[in-house]
Image (cartoon, rainbow, N blue to C red):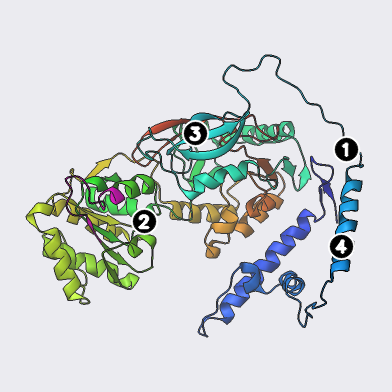
Amino acid sequence: MSTIESSNPKLVQIQSRQSRIEEYHRLRDKIAEASRQQQGGPKQYWRSLEELADTEEFRAYVYNEFPEQAAEWNDPVGRRRFLKLMGASLALAGVSACAYQPRELIVPYVNQPEEEVPGKPLFFATATPFGGFGLLVKTNEGRPTKIEGNPMHPASMGATDVFAQASILNLYDPDRSRNVLDRGDIGSWSKFLGTARTALEGQRGNGGAGLRILTETINSPTLIAQLKGLLTEFPAAKWIQYDPASRDNANLGAVQAFGTPVNTVYRFDQARVVLAVDSDFLQCGGGNLRYARDFIAGRRVEGERREMNRLYAIESTPTNTGAKADHRLSMRPSEVEAFMRTLAAQLGGAAAGGATYTGNAQFVTALVRDLQLPENRGRSIVIVGDEASPTVHALGHAINAALGNVPATVFYTDTVEMVVDQGAMMRELVREMSAGAVEVLLIVGGNPVYNAPADLNFGDALLRLSETPNKLTAHLSSHEDETSLLCRWHIPESHYLEAWSDTRAYDGTAAIIQPLIEPLYGTTKSAHE
């Protein structure tokens, strides 16, 4: 069992890479066995994968946390004993101040920046790569301390979500990766560059036929241009994008309706009636900040407004949006398409073939009547969630057109990201890895070993590729996760507040991501680097 010292001499990685890989396989097998055992039996609930797998480590943790037959200490503490304990603790507290502290160099400003006043915060505009909306970041003495929305950015209008608020914690996370790792041992950036250059030079003869690049969905124009430039240099290489929650169904539905993928943008501030079909638009999606702001503004009865908008929710899973709906109808996922076909037929939209909905007829009648009111013509929205089938998305487009909502409350733009069938590309990548066609695999961000579908066995294919001689696998990420463990190389990633970049929001608005602080660790790199 090897030990690996980190950049902090007090921290020692005790567990070897091989033992961690064995632990990964053991946990995976136990989870698969537990899943097979409960098929056809009573429902079981668990709070973590470790609890489901019922590993020895988890049982030991539970025992130490909640020991069985543990006696409660009911010995009362008298006044004299309390004073003795307090006196001893105060005496020991004074002893701790006598310890020798390591020497630290404090460097003052030679020429203090004019705008830098101790105790007075500064605010800088930037953007988040997750959703692309604008941010205002509060800094104190050069360190980011608080993240808020940028009121001048059209995608956020000053709002922000919990993910942006919490992203600053990742910047100061003590568990962030700090070192380049080569098979679990500390390496160097220069050594990785040498290995990568050698591997890429070996691909020039066949045009990069063995080169694969796996990324998350990218909305950075600069990074997209860089990847396209690399594909131009290696025309036979392939770029795969994968997110566990992708917009594949929405894009396929747009192709069914229009013949080409489009980006749908909604204007909730102009809508009097909203129908959400398996859509949690107030909480999820790239435009949820602006959509929530505009929708809630329509709920306020003030000024000349004498009535608020109405929200109908059709959903198979409870959501925050459904909880706020004036009228909510729950149904099975298999019934959603039939409901949309019935609704489209009654509204005059295209609904050829397929089953019809025979459930709550009173709800459907009231919804159709509300949507067809003359004052609601062109002032309604039918929004479909990303998880719905492509056919449901196509029916949503047809209903919006039949109600005259385009372009008053619904309009279409070019897609923000590159549209690909992510699920199909991921399956093809695993097949090529298993067949030995992949020689160089560069994974930029994400954690596909953890969140890829289990039946793909991506982790097993990646481990075999990493252990094959003369083949290269590398993973860029902020933490050493499951994917980093199974790759040969792990490269620590810079936080978005530490690096330059750019991004685009749900409506196509472009924004610059500017760094607010020097990288806390000199070994981290951004995706552009």
- Of label 1 and label 2, which has the lower sequence position? 1
Q: Amino acid at mark 2?
A: Asp
Q: Which callout, 3 or 1, points to the residue nearer the camera?
A: 1
Q: Amino acid at mark 3?
A: Leu
Bin the neighbour count of mark 2 within 10 Å (Cα to Cα): few under 14, some 14-19, many 20 and up.
many
Instruction: Quote the CA–CA distance across marks 3 and 1.
Output: 45 Å
Specify whether 486 is left or right of 186. Answer: left
Instruction: Quote the CA–CA distance across marks 4 and 1.
Output: 31 Å
Residue depicted at x 62% and y 58%: 459
Specify whether 271 is left or right of 86. Answer: left
Q: Which callout, 1 or 2, points to the residue nearer the camera?
A: 1
* Residue on which disc 3 sits: 223
Q: Is residue 497 visible?
A: yes
- Of label 4 and label 3, which has the lower sequence position? 4
Instruction: Quote the CA–CA distance across marks 4 and 2.
Output: 64 Å
Q: Which callout, 4 or 1, points to the residue nearer the camera?
A: 4
Foreground residue, 19 or 335?
335
- Of label 3 and label 2, which has the lower sequence position? 3
* Residue on which disc 4 sits: 83
Bin the neighbour count of mark 1 within 10 Å (Cα to Cα): few under 14, some 14-19, many 20 and up.
few
Mark 4 residue element: helix
Foreground residue, 116 or 505?
116
Specify whether 237 is left or right of 57. Answer: left
Residue 310 part of the magenta-drawn span: yes
Using the image, determine if residue 164 lies above or below residue 202: below
* Residue on which disc 1 sits: 101
Q: Which residues are magenta?
A: 295-311
Mark 3 residue element: helix
